[in-house]
Image (spheres, rainbow, N blue to C red):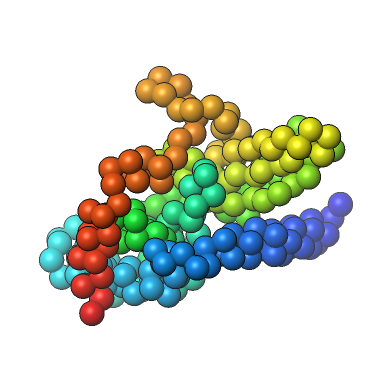
Amino acid sequence: MNRNKIGVSILVLATLLIGMVLIPAASAQEGDKYSVTAEEAFKHANAHMISFIAADADFEEWNGAFIDPKPLELYDINGEKLYYQFSVYKDNNTIGKIYVCADKKLGHSVKAFEFNPKSFNATEAMIKSIEIAKNKYPTGEIKSTIMVVYSYPSIGAMTVVKDKNTGNEYRIFVDAYSLDIVEDETATETEPGVWSIYEHRLKNGVEEHLKEWQESDQLTK
């Protein structure tokens, strides 16, 4: 296959990924009074960046930078939308990332700032996870593929495939940076694996987290 055909194939598959993954995932969030829209998250990202540039010398390099309003959506391994990952640009270079919570129950709106981030290709990671799922379960049905935080702060792609004979569903995880398979086993202090930061955060209660979100929201007023 020549280079042009490869490029077209990837473009077509990427388009299918958008239709198959992002739309159903967004629909699942409708009606949730605690969910945060991308537009609302963008306001929080901007407000916090401006505040930190003014008050923290570590953010001096970010003076004059701007945030891409179109974030990468990151999900928890349980399927809940977790964060919006915004890219920060200056002089046509990515100098940082801002992670904004996609659910008010998670607490303060801005989860983390990242300086001089290492890049990854989300589409490439999702394609890889689908390929592995199809090879491992050739008669299975691909149910979804999303970008997830599989073991905070590690990011990867997760494909859910359903066995047509048994009805069982299986998850395939691929690390976003290395494209290596991550076993669907609970992570421990000594063994890699996956765990839900969403469930971990909610164990500490919801009311206090909602108050923290309200505090963060005041910065956007």
Q: With 119 as the anchor, is 46 left or right in this view? A: left
What is the tally of numbered marks visible in this picture? 0
Q: Is residue 42 left or right of residue 141?
A: left
Rendering coords of residue 18 (x, y %): 66, 63
Question: Residue drawn 74% across and 47% down?
Answer: 142
Along the line of sight, which residue is nearer the eye, 184 or 12?
Answer: 184
Q: Residue at x 57, y 31 (%)?
A: 184
Position in image of residue 47 (x %, y %): 26, 73
Res 141 → quadrant: top right
Out of 122 and 137, give the one closest to the viewer. 137
User: Which residue: 75% across, 58% down?
Assistant: 13
**Front position in the image: 9 or 22:** 22
* As drawn, 19 above or below 118: below
Residue 221, compared with residue 9, is above or below; it is below
The answer to whether residue 6 is left or right of residue 193 is: right
**Is residue 140 in sight in this rendering?**
yes
Give residue 221's position: percent from left, percent from top. 23, 79
Please give the name of the residue rendered at 61% of the width and 33% of the height, measured from the top-left corner.
181
Residue 156: quadrant of the picture: top right
Q: Furthest-top residue in view? A: 190
Would you say 203 lies left or right of 171 here?
left
Residue 77, placed above or below residue 115: above
Res. 112 in view: no
Instruction: Please identify the residue farthest to the bottom as the structure is shown.
Output: 221
Horizontal and vertical percent position of residue 128: 68, 44
